[in-house]
Amino acid sequence: MEWADKAVGFLLSYISLSIFTYYTFWVIILPFVNSDHFIHRYFLPQEYAILIPVFAGMVLLCFLSLFIGYVMLKSKKKKA
Amino acid sequence: MKHIVKILTLLVTISALWIGLLQTAIIPRSHTWLLPIYFIVSLGCYGLLLVGVGLVQFPTCPQEAVLLQQDVIEAKEYLKQKGIDVGGCD
């Protein structure tokens, strides 16, 4: 079981580092590169830099409240 | 109490810097508006990284686990001698 935990931890670190690097490139460095440079083909337009995090945050919040509601309902049923 | 003061100071400093950037308009407005979201995204990445590093470096002690299992078996045998059924499944 230990190696599975290690693999999950490594995967989490890798995902977070890659998201951070990509987003930094997208938001901080890309505005200073000419708009006809070839690197712009690998990135979505700038509007999506706001849309995607906000959408992901909303989805996360929805799942969190769903989970909390489910747990509260379950605990209330057990008490009765 | 000290921690929250530190965090609040950091937040106030960052928002003051951001408002200053918005007012002076050194960088175009559309890029300045992205910075708070960038801050939140990097905070999330930091949290995820901490969880991942914690999972990788989670301390385990196999020798202690073996000793604990031996202790459990010993205790069960002792209790069985005294006539108490512990109901062990293994």
Image (tube, coloured by chain):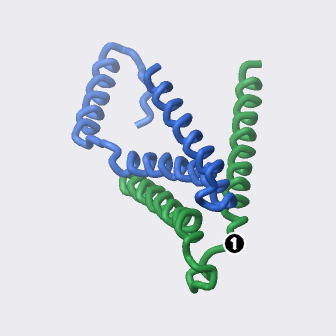
Question: According to the image, label 1 marks what residue?
Answer: A45
Q: Residue at x 53, y 30 (%)?
A: B8
Residue B64 placement (x, y as % from top left): 24, 36
Residue B83 placement (x, y as % from top left): 37, 15
Position of residue A22 in the picture relative to residue A7 (left or right): right
**Between residues B45 and A62, which one lies in front from this camera angle?**
B45
Quarter of the C terminus of chain A within the rendering: top right
The chain that appears blue in the image is: B
Q: Residue at x 60, y 60 (%)?
A: B27
- Compared to B1, does A33 lie above or below? below
Element type at mark 1: loop
Three-letter code, disc 1: Pro
The chain that appears green in the image is: A
Question: How many residues crowd mark 1 within 10 Å: few (<14), some (14–19), many (20+)?
Answer: few
Residue A37 placement (x, y as % from top left): 58, 84
Chain designation of label 1: A
